[in-house]
Structure formats: C-alpha cells, structure tokens
Image (cartoon, rainbow, N blue to C red):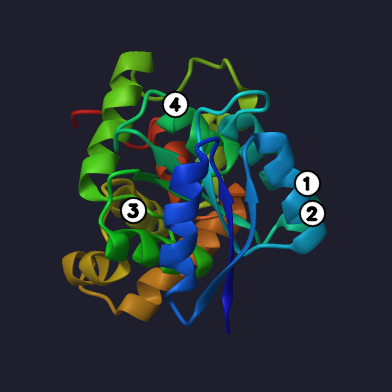
Amino acid sequence: MTIKVLLADDQALLRSAFRVLVDSDPDMEVVGEASDGAEAVEIVRAKGADVVLMDIRMPGTDGLTATRMISEDPELTGVRVVMLTTFEVDEYVVDSLRAGASGFLGKGAEPEELLSAIRIAAAGEALLSPAATKGLIARFLAQGDGARDGEDPAYDASRLDALTVREREVLVQVAGGLSNDEIAARLEVSPLTVKTHVNRAMAKLGARDRAQLVVISYETGLVRPGA
C-alpha cells in the first residue's frame, strides 16, 4: 500500500527537496504541496493524505492551527501530522502535540530518518525520539509541574480513573519514550500485551496516538518532570 504524503512548508526549495526524496521511495508518493496551513487542510480534504509533513511556522495559517483543524475534523481521523522544526526541540512542540500532531522531526534530519518518520506516523505510532521526549519534559518544567491546576477540565487527573493498574504502569513507560519491546522487557510481559494495554489506554483517554498519551501523562500529573 502506497503512503500518500502532503508537504506543507512555505519554502519552495525545501518542498522540492522533500518531494524528490519521498517520491524516490517506491512505497510513498507526494499527493500535493502547500505553502501555508490553510492550503494544506484544503488539499488534505480534497485529495486525501496519510501523512502531512507540516512546518510549524508559516505565513497566514500556521502549522499549529492547521494541525488542530485536521485533528478535529471527523472526516480526517486517519490523517497523521508530523511537525517539521528548525530544531528538534521547538518552543511549540507541546502545543503541537496537544493539537494532534503525531510527533516532530528536525528539518536537518537525514533522508532515511525522514522516510522512517513517515512510515512510523502512517502506522499510527508516535514519532518521539529520546531527545524529543526530553525536550517535551523540559517544556512541561517551564510551563509548570504536572497537571494544570484545573485550568482545563479535559486534563483533570480523574481521567485516569478509567485505567487499570497495569495500564497506568504501561502509560508511565510510554511517557518515558520507551517502545513496546522495551516496555515488555521492563515489565516482563509480551510486546503484544503491551500493545493491547497501550491501545486500551488510548481508547479510554481519547488519545489519537502515543504522542498524546505522553502529553496526557504529564498534564494529569501521572508522571512528574524530573521524577
């Protein structure tokens, strides 16, 4: 099955470079290019896409707003967004994940890293490297420890009441950036069991993917920065 990719960046030269790279992979194809967020959303709705490589900073409608528009559209539930950042740890990373992005990638990433990111996102997994996860935690430290003191009831710690003890244990490991195999080894269970717990946690918490599980873990105070 061919992975359909949309490129959204205001730099035409960068889009061209990404197009050549993506189209060189026999399992991928570029279905469109956009120079701002509004155009990206319009193309996704018209042509469809499995993965959107979305620049955060664009004139007009920025990538953050466009990502939120995609994630909130019930007809685009299968679309995954990977944010492109100048640096791997961007000041808008947390907001991007809250908006529904599946992860983020530095624009200076190696070609194979970018193709791998597209595959990971298309498979419904979260693209959070160890460095990225550390950056995410750092942002929570800057914004305040744990839950947001009732600022947003959607992130009330009581949301976790629906989880079993084991699901909470797995969620803690997910928040640390561990893969299913790594979690399985640590908890002495099978990777399939871990995957089942992760999927159930996502369903109960209304998370699109693992990236949002990480955000929820810190928002609710299940995991504390620096703990």
Whole-percent x, y for residue 100 in the image? 58, 43
Tell which circle, 4 or 1, labels the residue nearer the N-terminal end. 1
Residue pointed to by mark 2? 45
Circles 1 and 2, Cβ within 8 Å, touching? The answer is: yes
Callout 3 secondary element: helix
Tell which circle, 1 or 3, labels the residue nearer the N-terminal end. 1
Tell which circle, 2 or 4, labels the residue nearer the N-terminal end. 2
Tell which circle, 3 or 4, labels the residue nearer the N-terminal end. 4
Q: Give the amino acid at mark 2.
A: Arg
Q: Which mark is residue 57?
A: none
Residue pointed to by mark 3? 174
Q: Which mark is residue 92?
A: 4
Whole-percent x, y for residue 106 in the image? 32, 43
Q: Using the rendered view, name the quadrant where residue 31 is placed.
A: bottom right
Whole-percent x, y for residue 22 in the image? 46, 66
The Cα atoms of the two marked residues, 4 and 1, are separated by: 23 Å
Residue pointed to by mark 1? 42
Q: Is residue 120 visible?
A: no
Tell which circle, 3 or 2, labels the residue nearer the N-terminal end. 2
Q: Nearer the viewer, mark 1 or mark 3?
A: 1
The Cα atoms of the two marked residues, 2 and 4, are separated by: 25 Å
Residue that appears at 57% across and 79% down: 2
Callout 4 secondary element: loop
Circles 4 and 1, Cβ within 8 Å, touching? The answer is: no
The quadrant in which the N terminus is found is bottom right
The Cα atoms of the two marked residues, 3 and 2, are separated by: 31 Å
- Between 67 and 143, the one lying in front of the other is 67
Residue that appears at 40% across and 44% down: 214
The Cα atoms of the two marked residues, 3 and 4, are separated by: 21 Å
